[in-house]
Amino acid sequence: MLTKPTDNSILKPNRQLTVLSLLLVIALSTVNSLEKYEVSYQEGSYARIEIEGKTHIKYTVHLQKGQYLAFGYGVGMMNVDMVVFKSSTVPEVIDLYSYDETVPATDSQQDYLYNYTSNSTHVQFQASRLLVTTDSKDKAIKLHNGRGSFEAYVSNNGDILFQRDTSSTGWDYQLMAKVHGWFLWVAWSVLGFIQMSVNRYLKIYWKINMWIHRIVGTLIFILTVIMSIIGLRNHKYIFFGQYVHHILGFIVFFGITLLVAGGIITRSRMVRLRWKTSTILIFKNIHKSYGYLMLCIGQAAVLTGVLHYNERHYPQSDLWIPNIVIYILLWVLIEIMYQVFLRRESPFKSSMIKITVQEFESRVQSGQKLVLLDDFVLDVSKYMPNHPGGKFSLEANIGRDVSKFFYGGYSLENYTKLPPLHTHSNMARYIVNGLIVAQLDNLATSQVANMRIKSSNNVNKLTQTIIFEREDNQQVGFQRYFKDIQMIGRHYLVRSIKNKQVKRHYTVANCMEPNAYLVYLELLKGNSNAYQEKQDLFQEKSGGSFSITCKNYRTQQGVSRRLHEQKNDTFQVQGPLGKGLQIHPSGTHIAFTAGTGILVFVDLVAHLIRKNLNLLPPDEDSQISIKDFKFILYASFQSEQDSIAYEMCKGLHTYCESKGLKNFEFNVRFSNAVKTRWDYGFIEKVLSVYGDRELQRVWVCGIPKMNEDFHRAFENLAKNNQIKTTQYEIL
Ligand code: HEM
């Protein structure tokens, strides 16, 4: 059983001493033999070592009877000068030399002068020796300007805890150990926590948090490097000691360098990479995980350092326990609060500044970095480089509606194994509130209401037109027909009350309502009676009902599955939102669509049917020039059975051909029959037919991969001045 010395003097550096290569080897034995290093250090025993008169090293040793205490000048037992204090029946101080880890040999020349006193339990030795003796087996102890110190410790289990050569001048080891410890505690406990927090919990302060992250990261780096060097110097530049603390310290020292380098690379990737969001996220996640790992290792290094220090200096201190407990509790508490916050839904702040879609467009054309989210105009110029999903995600959508990306319905990039679909959290909503600069002055005020499904009608195997009615039965707020063609392309935001997290957009496609659709088909067949009978379908009036057409994607959490299968659900609906197609009164408009993407354009086709049949009232008719407006619709479906509004589009196309009308052209592609894809060459060819002046707008609304193909193709064409960035829109 081993206890600590009660007199702490042996543990404290003595400024009077400079001892070169002094290693304490303490071996206190309960048996009367040095062969057995079985340690048992009894209460009341102590040893003090001093330099006397700059010439001698002096030992004062108080030992329990029947024990040994040995000191060695060196590291380990190999080739070490030793002295042993033996408190047996005749107490002795013996000058020894240890060649190996066996019994040390007694020096032929004994250089210690000693005396002793004893009582019934202990022997008190006074022994001294010249710093430099004439015996080659004795360690020559050099003084440096008469100053210096050394320390020697015994652990609870009898191991030597600390051994050091203190040959250098003016270096206060204990002070430096304190400086090392405190600064590294500040670096890894306080600054490390701030570092993690600014990036995780305080994203909302994006204007300053990247700077805080940079400054704090640099501070941690500098402190770690300097304090590690101080620690190493205290430890004689021995990289790996026998303590876990030294190994962890070594890992932290090199690890932080990699972390800082990783952070700089990640940041540059986030700002520079285009069409590589997955790569950005990989860099980000590596940096993030590595950062957390370093934070844990840093904490462990601090903790083992504290334990190591306390063992020597404050053996009774348990302060490290509240330190780590408070640290973990604080982290857990903040994390819980953060998770609760993320799951909430803070409302967007409405803006007093209302602008029209045209104003939005012209501001974008003048270089402002604006995007639309629902009805909100956001200025993202400063936010872009700070966007956690990378700058490119926003840059590629300047002037566009980012709602479907924001709500996680669509991904900009779709050719990677893990497309970065991201449903934005409440944190992002908070940030959005800080970016709102205006709100769209919507022609039909957007409404929010809880709706239930009144009826539904199959369009094809997976697609249905669903008619909603207000749950509160009020007959206000929603319309089933819009006179204004600028409403075409706007959308409703729909979510199930039972799963509010998932929100999806469904485009306004009023002509798909079964009754209306039949009327259009009848009109194309030349039967105008049906139209006269159903006039109410073409009157703009506010009511409690509207329709959407949607495909069932059959995903477990999806809104579309609930719309198709859980007909008794209640849905929260908001809309119409967005900026619509911005159809120009004249010029050529081209749309490339696939699957349900055609729904965005069906109301324009329906409008053209009535226009070409002269059935529009003057106020509606005047919106599009009969002379030089043209709409060319490209649609792709898997087969005719899977098509949507095919009969209506085909019907108008045939009608236009038969009447020599030039304002509509329908090109359909059934992929089960035609294998060739709409590739870059195809897109270039279609666009080359129309001069720059003639071409007003090109829209693309297809499956995600098709959208991406067109987006990239248009970027290339824009580089070659074959199209302007303001002319095309990926919906
Ligand atoms: C102005 C609108 C936007 C804001 C304010 C915004 C904000 C944020 C925020 C705060 C995050 C971190 C995670 C979270 O809190 O949800 C995030 C992540 C992300 N954002 Fe956005 N975002 C916007 C638009 C977009 C758009 C348009 C895209 C894609 C085209 C996009 C793609 C992503 C992706 C992929 C991530 C995931 C990053 C990760 O996994 O850490 N964001 N965004």
Image (tube, helix red, strand yellow):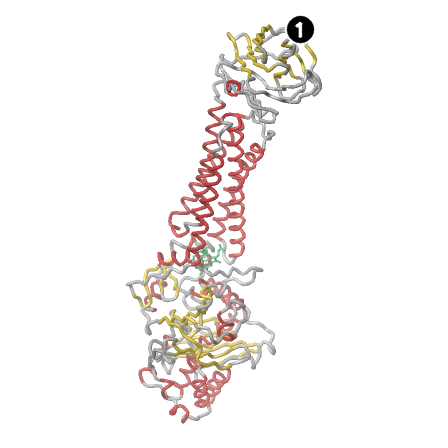
Q: Quadrant of the C terminus?
A: bottom left
Extreme-front residue of the structure? 120
Whole-percent x, y for residue 235 in the image: 55, 26
Q: Above or below — where is 472 with respect to 722?
A: below
Q: Above or below — where is 360 with respect to 237?
A: below
Name the quarter showing ligand 1. bottom left
Residue 130 visible? no
Whole-percent x, y for residue 541 in the image: 33, 81
What residue is rendered at 49% in x and 57% in y?
A: 274
Whole-percent x, y for residue 546 in the image: 40, 78
- For badge 1, the amino acid type reads Gln
Whole-percent x, y for residue 87 in the image: 63, 12
The secondary element bearing badge 1 is classed as loop
Q: Is residue 244 left or right of residue 621?
A: right
Q: Quadrant of the N terminus?
A: top right
Along the line of sight, the residue nearer the viewer: 687 or 489? 489
What residue is rendered at 35% in x and 71% in y?
A: 446
Q: Above or below — where is 305 with respect to 163?
A: below
**Residue of label 1:** 109
Q: Callout 1 environment at 10 Å: few (<14), some (14 to 19), or many (20+)? A: some
Does the closest atom of ligand 1 sit within 8 Å of the Cβ of label 1?
no
Q: Is residue 90 left or right of residue 461?
A: right
Residue 42 occupies quadrant: top right
Residue 319 visible? yes
